[in-house]
């Protein structure tokens, strides 16, 4: 890596660390990373003087700001903090931002909610806090796009847009490995058992196939779907009862036992919709689509 100026090195170090540092700390890290080269005996003093002069000379246009005595930070952090203040205190988005800022790594909706509750960052959680958290972050990203403070990484992981590439590198690596696996799997065409039902030639081999098949027959089961979401449980619907249309929460799985494998809380879900029911003592209702299709076709 080529050498940079003291100012450039200070910016890189503070950007990477994400916290205020003294001139000595910045210099130590910059030298260790081989960002600067100096023959002087007091490089930390030079670093401090350069940053002070940059603040004095450029004023509001300086990259730096004095956080406390002897410590410097980046002015862009204040902009982020100002954005954070638009979130209502105790709200799900405010709690998510604080949790991700503290943990400094991508987290699942379940983990964000768990930490937020543990730290008392939420004023109200309701019966399905994970579902609410997921919906709010997803809608914030969808509505604001690249102006959202949040980014979605994969199906159920979120991070902060302000993070640099180093924080996200591991998550990006995992996503790339997953894509490579999927591409490898596509080299051979593998299908399920033939069912020839409603335009679907073969039975499902995964959760997505279950969702597609369910969309073909949900009305035959007397179930209306109100929402599909990226967090647990997968869907909210209503089912006709003697008292009227009752709300229900649905989780889709290829096999019912995967519900237990994923460590989902049965108290937060009413029905598992799956292709194969292999969970003998399942504590909640299971709709096994393989059996339903056979009954509809009269087999």
Image (cartoon, rainbow, N blue to C red):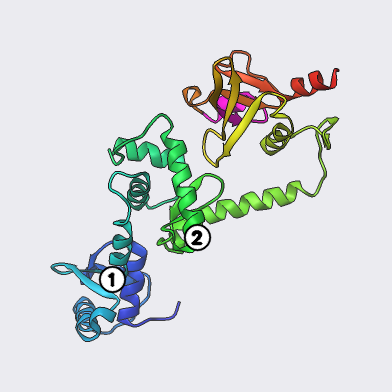
Q: Residue at x 29, y 70 (%)?
A: 74
Q: Name the residue under label 1.
A: 75
Instruction: Name the outermost residue toward the bottom.
Output: 57
Q: Quadrant of residue 255?
A: top right
- The residue nearer to you, when weighing 30 against 222, is 222
- Give percent across and percent down for residue 20: 24, 64
Residue 242 falls within the magenta-colored stretch: no
Q: Distance between the residues labelled 1 and 2?
A: 23 Å
- The residue nearer to you, when weighing 107 against 126, is 126
Disc nearer the start of the sequence (1/2): 1
**Mark 2 Cα shell of 10 Å, populated few (<14), some (14-19), many (≥20):** few
Say if residue 265 shows up in the picture: yes
- Give percent across and percent down for residue 23: 22, 72
Q: Name the residue under label 2.
A: 145
Residue 255 falls within the magenta-colored stretch: yes
- The residue nearer to you, when weighing 160 against 51, is 160
Q: Give the vertical position of 31 relative to 226 (above or below).
A: below
Total marks placed? 2
Asked if residue 212 lies left or right of residue 227, the reply is: right
Q: Find the magenta span and give its range.
A: 249-263
Q: Quadrant of residue 50?
A: bottom left
Which quadrant does the N terminus fall into?
Answer: bottom left
Marker disc for residue 29 = none
Say if residue 18 shows up in the picture: no
Q: Residue at x 21, y 76 (%)?
A: 44
């Amino acid at each position: 890596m080529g050498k940079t100026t003291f100012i450039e090195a200070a910016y890189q170090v503070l950007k990477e660390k994400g916290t205020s540092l003294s001139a000595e700390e910045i210099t130590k890290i910059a030298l260790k990373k081989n960002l600067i080269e100096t023959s002087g005996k007091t490089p930390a003093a030079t670093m401090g003087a350069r940053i002070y002069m940059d603040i004095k000379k450029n004023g509001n246009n300086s990259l730096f700001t004095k956080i406390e005595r002897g410590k410097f930070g980046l002015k862009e952090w204040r902009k982020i903090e100002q954005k954070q203040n638009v979130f209502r205190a105790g709200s799900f988005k405010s709690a998510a931002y604080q949790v991700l800022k503290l943990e400094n790594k991508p987290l699942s909706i379940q983990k964000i909610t768990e930490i937020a509750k543990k730290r008392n960052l939420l004023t109200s959680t309701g019966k399905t806090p994970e579902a609410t958290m997921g919906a709010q972050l997803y809608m914030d990203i969808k509505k604001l796009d690249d102006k959202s403070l949040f980014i979605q990484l994969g199906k159920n992981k979120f991070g902060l847009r302000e993070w640099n590439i180093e924080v996200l590198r591991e998550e990006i690596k995992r996503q790339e490995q997953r894509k490579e696996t999927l591409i490898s799997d596509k080299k051979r065409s593998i299908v399920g058992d033939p069912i020839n039902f409603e335009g679907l030639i073969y039975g499902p081999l995964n959760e997505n196939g279950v969702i597609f098949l369910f969309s073909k027959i949900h009305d035959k089961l007397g179930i209306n779907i109100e929402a599909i979401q990226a967090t647990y449980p997968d869907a909210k619907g209503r089912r006709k009862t003697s008292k009227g249309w009752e709300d229900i929460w649905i989780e889709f799985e290829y096999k019912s036992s995967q519900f237990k494998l994923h460590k989902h809380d049965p108290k937060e879900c009413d029905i598992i919709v799956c292709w194969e029911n292999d969970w003998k003592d399942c504590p909640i209702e299971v709709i096994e689509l393989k059996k339903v299709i056979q009954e509809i076709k009269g087999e």
